[in-house]
Amino acid sequence: MTKALLIQARDPEDPMMTHEYECFSRMTGISRDNLLAVNSLTENNLPVDSADLVLIGGSGKYSATENFPWMEPVLDAIRRIRERGIPLFGSCWGFHVIGKAFGAPVITDEKRKELGTLPVSLTEEGKKDELFSRLPPIFPVQLGHKDNVSETPLGAVRLAFSELHPMQAFRIKDCPIYATQFHPEMTAADMRLRVRNYLDLGYVNENERHSLQQILEDFRDTPESNSILKLFIQTFCE
């Protein structure tokens, strides 16, 4: 049975902390007994060495463009995971901190902010990758971000892109470390809940608030994207 660790970066009172845990448990198929969550804001000792699989999700209000005191242990843990060959999957903020751990700049770019269910396309490398090659060449994903990884991380290969961003997914070569800008752990209903909870974090600006209901209605389910986490576990953990 896979023992997984979920690294989170959220205020203790953030209701999305529990929601994020539930999303990862549901989409990985890993039960609560086998999925341990650790909040990096309050716990510097991240027990990655005892995990068969490590997951990193979103962060609420904390941007990877900043150097918070609690972030360096997360970056160190990511590098240690690579050294020990532990499977690691990161989404959204996880995508950003994995990129940062391997030397890629993380920037805030309001002009390239993406919010909604949008298509991504596989790169030629993605079409040959042992995980992403099992996905369609173009498939819809759940996106909600204004930060992005602006260069390919050291030792990484780019797997997917969108109309606005050349990098929506990457893999660190020769080890089971994957990261996606999008949320394979979330459905349309999950995204609606997340957006409603984060209205004041800048993801929905004043102009967009007037069309908020339409934004929420436009989210669509993404079964291909939602298959990624189970495929990742089947490929690298079983």
Image (tube, rainbow, N blue to C red):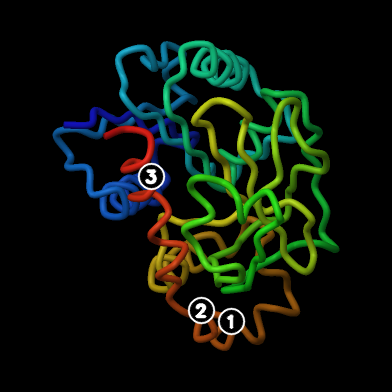
Is residue 60 at all visible to an observer of this figure?
A: no
Amino acid type, residue under disc 2 in the picture:
Phe
Kindly indicate whether the residue at mark 1 contacts the one at mark 2 (C-beta within 8 angstroms): yes
* Inter-mark Cα distance, 3 to 1: 23 Å
**Foreground of the two, 200 or 121:** 121
* Badge number at residue 215: 1
Check disc 2 and report the residue beneath it. Answer: 219
Check disc 3 and report the residue beneath it. Answer: 17
Identify the residue at image location x=37%, y=40%: 235
**Foreground of the two, 63 or 148:** 148
Element type at mark 1: helix
Element type at mark 2: loop
Amino acid type, residue under disc 1 in the picture:
Ile
The location of residue 66, given as percent across then percent down, is 73, 31
Is residue 214 at all visible to an observer of this figure?
A: yes
Quick check: 109 left or right of 121?
right
**Where 2 sits versus 138, above or below?**
above
* Inter-mark Cα distance, 3 to 2: 21 Å
Quick check: 213 left or right of 12?
right
**Foreground of the two, 119 or 23:** 119
Kindly indicate whether the residue at mark 2 contacts the one at mark 3 (C-beta within 8 angstroms): no
Amino acid type, residue under disc 3 in the picture:
Met
Q: Considering only order in the chain, which callout, 1 or 3, is on the residue closer to the N terminus?
A: 3
**Where 194 sits versus 45, above or below?**
below
Quadrant of the image for the C terminus? top left
**Where 59 sits versus 49, above or below?**
below
Identify the residue at image location x=61%, y=41%: 95
